[in-house]
Structures are given as structure tokens and as C-alpha cells.
Amino acid sequence: MSVVGAGVIWVALLGPVIVLFDHISGSAIASALTQPGALQPVATSLESGLVTLGVLAFICTPLSWMLARGKLPFPRVWEAGVLCSLLLPPLVIGLLLIFMVGPYTPIGEILSDLHQNATNTFLALVIAEVYESAPYYVLGAQAAFASVEPRLEQQAGLLGDRPGRVFRRVTLPLAAPGLAMSLSIAWARAMGAFGAVIIIAYHPYGIPLEIYTTLQETGLPFALPYALVLLVVALPLPLAAYIWSARAARRRSG
Amino acid sequence: MLHADVQVDRREFTVQAALQVAPGERLALFGPSGAGKTTLLETIAGLVQPRRGLISVNGRVLTSTDPPVRAVPPWQRRVGLLRQNPGLFPHLSVRDNLRYAPSVPRSGTELSSLASVLGIADLLPAMPARLSGGQAHRVALGRLLLAHCDVLLLDEPYTGLDASLRRTLTDLVSTLVAERGVPTVLVTHELTDAQAFADRLAVLDHGELLQAGAPDDVVLRPSSRRVAELIGYRGFVPAAAPGSGDQAVAGVHPERVIQGSWPDRGLVLTGVVAAARPAGAGWEADVRVGDALITCRLPDRPPDPGGEAVVTVLDPPYFGADGGALPAVAVTPASRAQIRP
């Protein structure tokens, strides 16, 4: 009985995906994607997503490590800050980003001196995706680092490794499965980023905005193929990370 | 030669100790939980910063709070620390764990010969999760020895393993460190482990080094009543000090008591059996002597509770009113001959 109950809940949660496959046909996808310029949003989303991942890995990994190891004074304040950006509705993030990096702000002026512009550009799209996905990565990476036994790092140090080498040889490999999972969750968030994007980066179109504008202009049947494309683009990385971390765990258990 | 003279602040008290351990010497640091033993080891390893102190190994200063101030970081100290948790890296095979330290020679001949001495040669390709507790400890020990540390610190490494495995591992460490001439400090709260391992025994209590010496001397001639209590003396009986005849207390260790009256071998006590119970292959009895209650381990069944017991405490240590030990009067064959009727 309990298995049946769990099954019902599981199917209900999967409902939207099931419905998607029920309402879509190969010919509809083919015709939608062979329209002139139809692949441009896919390319834009992939490019901005990859840049976003790079920024997160480069900037947020050290922060997560410091949070996990209690290297920061008043750790609760730092965590609350990260949670704050997680709890802000994306639409609000978009509005506030205009006031932060828009053309008539100090940051905007610096950017314009550099011949850059953070509204309706690729840069704006990346900024919006970073803000929508960063907290997921930071919190996940913090948990991944926290799961690494500090005594192991200490032991590696006593065996003669300086801190940088300890991080590379012990901390990073042990945290890697968790880091990969949080990075792929951040990827899925970045791929689907919409609320902040529609305000600060209406152009260039990524997949979510393509879905929205197609829905507005030509209706539901034409928007659905892009929904499938979004899933196909957003899901492989999380799935690969999941499989890889499961294999890493199996390898460790001998 | 390891030399450490440090004061380390802890929340409740200050750990204050001076140690010297010669190359190949094995020092056991014995004391109750929370005495500051681990703090002392962590200070030598550079994980804890002392308020004041000087630590040097073979003349190389690792820590100095006096000018020229030095605080060599842990990764440059070449001090090996083995804890109760062997701390193997779970993502590396046994072989990669063994050759983790950057100082391990690349050739691998030392690795394979040490692995066979440690009995882990067949386990080299295995992952740590597959190892038993004893095997993991052998690997951890091998990893430290291959790193060619100048000092080996063992922080209750074998707590939680069964007694025979503990003895095997302790013997193995003793042999290997003696061969390599590495000064070694073992922290333990088990006296028998300390005795089995060490050339020298140091007793630490509440951050203070109370006594250090040959294990026999410390056990048979504790320098104070507090040391005697820590070592396992379980009864203190008022008695006249030998020689001076002053009022003193004699320390009674349960294992240093025999049945019957043997005045030439120690202090004869007459008391009433308060309780008796089987213990191991013999008996353990609580005997009330005046106001004092002593516990004795006896090979023969003692009288039933309420019965009178006459026992001899073999050559007991005596303590003065201040708790300090009184000078021992040697029981020589000549004096025995005089006492004997």
C-alpha cells in the first residue's frame, strides 16, 4: 500500500514531464527548430550558462570553503547573506539589479568606461543567471566541504603538504561529488533563469525567454518544443553529476 | 632528541610540562582524561600555539616564544601524529595512502618491505573502507614511518581495539621506532599499555607533569599520593614511616598485597573483610583496616565478609601529611635477616 501511495505522489510530481511528452510530436519539434534563427536561443543559453558556471566555480568555491571551515567571523551573518539572495524572488532580483548595475549607476558608469553595458546584453544575461544560481551553488558547496573530515586535512599537513596542496590532494577530491552536484543544480537554475533575466536581459533571448515570447506571439503548441529543448539542455549535466558521484562513492567503498 | 618545555593555556587550566626524549627512546605520557596530554602532543605537532615555550628536535627549533621567535608550520615540522582514528584518505588506495607524504622515496622498495613487516602487503590495492580497524592502524603507522618523521607522537592510537590486537600493534611500534631511532611519545590512560610500550613513564595530571622516570620506579615509588592514586593505588592506611617512625600513610596497590603475615616483606595489616568477589583467576576483597578501606587482589579465596583477614602490603610507598612521598628504606637481605626470628 505504501509503495502505491509513494507511486501516486511520484507520478503526480512527474506530471508536467509526462504531459509534455504526451503533447509533443517529433514533427512539431523539427518544424520549430528548423525555423530561421531558432537555434540561436539554445546557443545563447548554453554560452551564458557555461560562463555562469565558470564564474561560480571561480568566485564562490573559496567562499563556500571558508563558510564550511568557519574561517569567517560572524558566520551566521555570512550565511544569512547567502540565504537572502536565495529567498529574494528572481523578479525582485532583476529589479534591484537595474538599480545596481544599470546605466546610471556607479557600476554602470565604470562598465560604460570599459565600453560594456549591463542591460539587455550577454553580460546582463550572465549577471542575472549568476544571481539566480549562486546561492544554490554556495550552499551546496558549503555542505560538500563540511563533509570532509578536518582531521584528514590536518593529517595531510602533518605528512608534509602545505595548505594549497592539501586542498588539491585531499579536500577537493573528497568534496568533488558534492561540488559536482551543486554545480549541476546551479546549471539547471541558470538554464531556467527567467525572473531576473526578463527585466535586466530581455535581449539576447535564451531558451526561457524564447518560450515566453513564442507563447505570447504564436501560442502554446509552438512554445512546447522549446520546453523540451530546455529540458534536454538543462538535464544532462545534473544526471551526469549524479551518476559520477554515485560511482565515486562506490569506488571509495572498495 | 626531542626537547619540549611549554606552557599552553586551556580553558580550565594551563598545561605546563618539560620533556626530553632521546633518539629511539619511548616515552609514555600517562594521565586521566582531560589532563592535557593531547594538548601537549598537538603543541609539539604545531597544531596548538603555546603561550610560552621552546620545542626543538635534533637541535632544529620548531617553536620558540622567546626571541628569535619561531613557529614552524605543521607541514614543515616532520612530526608524525597518529590518533585513535587512523585518518586514512578514503579516496586513495592503501598504496597511495602509504606513499602520500612528499618525502616518501619514489623507488618503492622501502614501501614494499615495510608493508610486509606490517603485514599489509596483500592489501596495497585495497581501498581503506575495506580494512578492519587493526589493518587501518597498520597502514596509518606505515604511512608515518615512510614519511620519515623526526618525531612520532601516538595519541591513544589503539583505544577501542581489543587487548591482544593492541598489544601486537604496540610491540610492532616499539620495534620499528627502536630500529629507526625516532623519539616517540605515546599518550595513554591505560597503565599497562604505557608499561608495555615505554622506556620511561611520565604522569600528567591537570596540566602538570607530576613525575617522570622508569616505569617500575613510577609505579612502585610514586612521588606523591596523587600520582599513587592515578597509578592505581586504591587504599591509604595510616602507619609509622619506616626509619623515622613519623606518622604517615602507606599506599596500598591492590596487586601488591599477599595473604598472611610477612613482616620482612612489607607492612602487615589486620582488618575485617567488607566484601569479596571473584576477579579473573583470583579474588578481589575490600578489607577495612581501622578507618581505611583497602582493596586487594588475592590468589586464594579470602575469608567471608565479616571475617578477619591478615594481609601483607609488599614494600609500600609512604606519604607524609603534605601528600609527598617519604624516602624509601630499602629492604635489604641483611635487614630481612635481622627481622626474621
Image (tube, coloured by chain):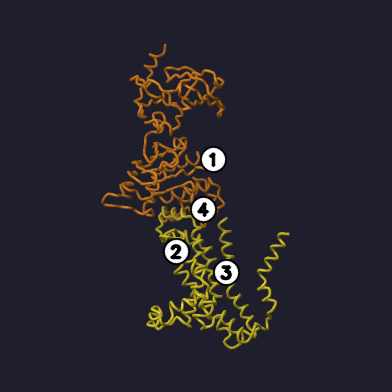
Chain colours: A yellow, B orange
Horizontal and vertical percent position of residue A53:
50, 72
Q: Mark 2 against mark 1, which lies toward the viewer?
A: 2
Check disc 1 and report its element: helix, strand or loop: loop
Question: Marks 2 and 3: which is nearer the front?
Answer: 2
Near-viewer residue (A23 or A35): A23
Query: Do discs 2 and 3 share a chain?
Result: yes
Asked if marks 3 and 4 fall on the same chain, the answer is no
- Residue linked to disc 4: B94
Given residues B326 and B68, the one toward you in this image is: B326
Work out which quarter of the rendered image holds the N terminus of chain B and state it: top left
What residue do we see at 50% from left, 64% from top?
A141
Q: In the rendered image, which residue does mark 3 sit on?
A: A238
Check whether the beta carbons of the residues at disc 2 and disc 4 lie within 8 A of each other: no
Instruction: Kindly give the residue lying farthest to the left in the view shown.
Output: B67
Quarter of the image for residue A207 reads bottom right
- Mark 3 packing: few (<14 Cα in 10 Å), some, or many (20+)? some
Q: Which residue is mark 2?
A: A78
Res A184 → quadrant = bottom right
Please say if the residues under marks 3 and 4 sit with CB atoms less than 8 Å apart: no
**Residue kind at label 4, given as amino acid type:** Val
Single out the residue that lies furthest toward the top.
Answer: B341
The Cα atoms of the two marked residues, 4 and 1, are separated by 23 Å
Q: How far from the left and from the top, in percent, is residue B61? A: 31, 49
